Amino acid sequence: MARSPGGSGRSPRDRDRDRSRDRDRDEDNELTDKLVTINRVAKVVKGGRRFAFAAIVVVGDQRGRVGHGAGKAREVPEAIRKATEAAKRGLIRVPLRDGRTLHHDVKGRFGAGKVTLRAAPAGTGIIAGGPMRAIFETLGIKDIVAKSVGTSNPHNMIKATFKALEQLNSPRMVATRRGKKVGDLLGRRDETTVEAAA
């Protein structure tokens, strides 16, 4: 095996692997997690009942990235750990306006869960309940009005909210898709608004 020019005897692949491992560790330090719900389930067996725990965790960096995961185990800490790892594997990036709210209103649906997310002016705060509040707090949204209709099952509510968040577009994304400039899309607004949107 050829030695690297630095003389350390390590291949470039090993160095890249270490670099990505350090990057993952830095990302883990930035991420905050919230336990949405924990559910105890019992399995009836010959000797009695066998208990297990199911946890749902939401993870985000409070700057536009968020993910959710579920985990099951015989012990609560292990279920939370599994759910957290699943959430970190499924992070999505959400475009935010001014780093505090959505660019536009959006609806999401999963199973019997239906959610409506609406952009809100500064100072509104997070008007949302249950699992949706945890998602917005870890995502970094400061102002939003959200309503859930239908089921109150946290699994379906979270998945419906993520379906809605995945549909969000920023003016820059729309402009790129249409081959235009951001200013052309937003019309005759002042330049600060255009710059903030971009």
Image (cartoon, helix red, strand yellow):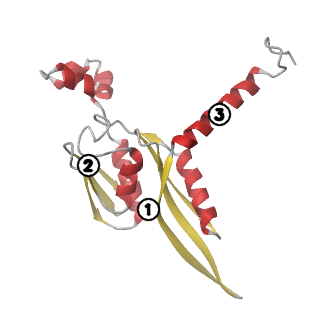
> Going by the picture, which residue comes out furthest to the right?
1
Do labels 1 and 3 touch, CB within 8 Å? no
Say which of 123 and 74 sits in front. Answer: 123
Can you tell which of label 1 and label 3 is closer to the viewer? 3
Q: Can I make out residue 110 in this image?
A: no
Where is residue 193 drawn, in percent x and y?
20, 26
Give the amino acid type for the residue marked by disc 3 in the picture: Asp
Where is residue 156 drawn, in percent x and y?
40, 61
> Going by the picture, which residue comes out furthest to the bottom?
47
User: How many tags in the picture?
Assistant: 3
User: Which mark is on residue 155?
Assistant: 1
Disc 3: which residue: 22
SS of the residue under disc 3: helix
Where is residue 76 drawn, in percent x and y?
60, 68
Give the amino acid type for the residue marked by disc 2 in the picture: Ile
Q: Residues within 10 Å of mark 2 (few under 14, many from 20)?
A: many
Dot 1 or dot 3: first in sequence order is 3
Q: Residue at x 74, y 20 (%)?
A: 12
Query: Relative to residue 42, is residue 72 depicted above or below?
Result: above
Q: Residue at x 58, y 70 (%)?
A: 53
Q: Residue at x 46, y 42 (%)?
A: 61
Work out how far the residue at label 1 is from the one at label 3, CA to CA, in angstroms.
Answer: 32 Å
Where is residue 141 drawn, in percent x and y?
33, 45
Work out how far the residue at label 3 is from the one at label 2, CA to CA, in angstroms.
Answer: 35 Å
Work out how far the residue at label 2 is from the one at label 1, CA to CA, in angstroms.
Answer: 21 Å
Give the amino acid type for the residue marked by disc 1 in the picture: His
Q: Quadrant of the C terminus?
A: top left
Disc 2: which residue: 144
SS of the residue under disc 1: helix
SS of the residue under disc 2: strand
Dot 3 or dot 2: first in sequence order is 3
